[in-house]
Amino acid sequence: MISKLFLSGTALVGGVLFAAAVDEVAPPQQLQKIKTSAMPKEHSATPADDAQKLAEEEAESAETAERRISPDEEAIRLVDDSFVKAYEAGNAMAVAEHFTTDAEYVDETGTVFEGRAAIEASMKEFFEESPACKLQISAESIRTISPGVVVQDGSTLITRGEESAPCECQYTTVYVKVDGKWLIASVRDSAPRDLREHSVHLQQLGWLKGDWIDEGDDSIVNFSCEAADNGNFLMRKFTIVIGGEEAMSGTQRIGWDPLTGKLRTWIFDSEGGYGEGLWHRDEENDRWVLKTTGVTADGETASSTSLYTFVNDHTMTWQSVDHEITGVQQPDSDIITIVRHSAGPAPAIAADQNAPAGR
């Protein structure tokens, strides 16, 4: 039976113990029928309809006019673009030139940097410690307070590669026009409101992303992993091919559990089996451990421990140990080497998958 074969480790899925149910979709004919029945019936236009349409168009036109970007806002957005380019180039002097000579910058920890020179020195030190940073500025509002003074509120996201979690901040920036040029007079950073760190914690397993394959003597297991739902989950999809035919498929969803403070996984297979488990980092042996429990499609309880070891950007190893089905101990699997589908470039992964978060 495929379920038994699968769970015993004969058909490997790189640590995924159960496969996923496939969502059903309506046949094309039925889908077209649903769409057709949902379409409104045509009717002849009346003078009242024309008047209502004209009023709606006028209201929309007025709303569009209100949303037009003011010259000040357009200028500030250009300054933001210039700031991002200088920041991502790691050019501390170019970044500092966006500030007035007596500007003040207060970071999210409350540290104050006074003057353009101090800001440049701080940025130089930061770029030396964290090269090749990416900066994303999301402006929430840009308000002209008085001629030559603009206040901007928004958030920033700093990314320092796969080895570090991104750093998100809320900010308030005061711009002033000096000799016809907009410069930053003041910046105050703060921790983001309602911060949820699901995606931050999930980056510890970011090295799982990509397309992977394990080729055995009589089976091939393909699985892919990608971010889902705004980066708050990792979704792993897999298929098991035996004798040239697909024997099973499924999904494994990985996410941060704020209740337990751990990375949790949910697994579903195409035959109806399911399971869940928790990940933890085994620092001593430099590997990740996933302990799962579940139920096969035949209603049998199952549990196992999967050991994942990152080798390099294109290689990982996996082993199943402490595997039981209905209380009967199963033999440990061999240590399996799993490789990426292609030899194309992959994100650099640091040896320490628990590297501290950004700034």
Image: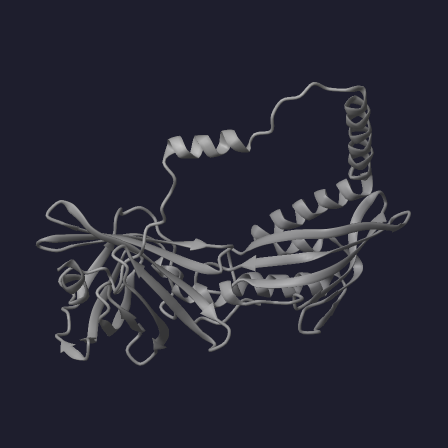
Q: Residue at x 49, y 55 (%)?
A: 229
When asked about the image quadrant of residue 280, the answer is bottom left
Q: Is residue 72 left or right of residue 204?
A: right
When asked about the image quadrant of residue 128, the answer is bottom right
When asked about the image quadrant of residue 90, the answer is bottom right
Quadrant for the C terminus, please.
bottom right
Q: Position of residue 85 (x, y in %)?
A: 61, 47
Q: Nearer the viewer, residue 274 or 46?
A: 46
> Which residue is situated farthest in the left direction here?
217
Quadrant for the N terminus, please.
bottom left
Q: Position of residue 310 (x, y in %)?
A: 29, 65
Vertical side of 229 occupied by 25: above or below: above
Q: Position of residue 249 (x, y in %)?
A: 26, 53
Q: Residue at x 54, y 33 (%)?
A: 38
Q: Nearer the viewer, residue 332 or 349?
A: 332
Q: Position of residue 130 (x, y in %)?
A: 52, 62
Q: Is residue 350 left or right of residue 103?
A: left
Vertical side of 29 occupied by 137: above or below: below
Q: Residue at x 84, y 42 (%)?
A: 180
Q: Is residue 142 left or right of residue 254?
A: right
Q: Is residue 95 left or right of residue 317?
A: right
Q: Nearer the viewer, residue 242 or 313?
A: 242
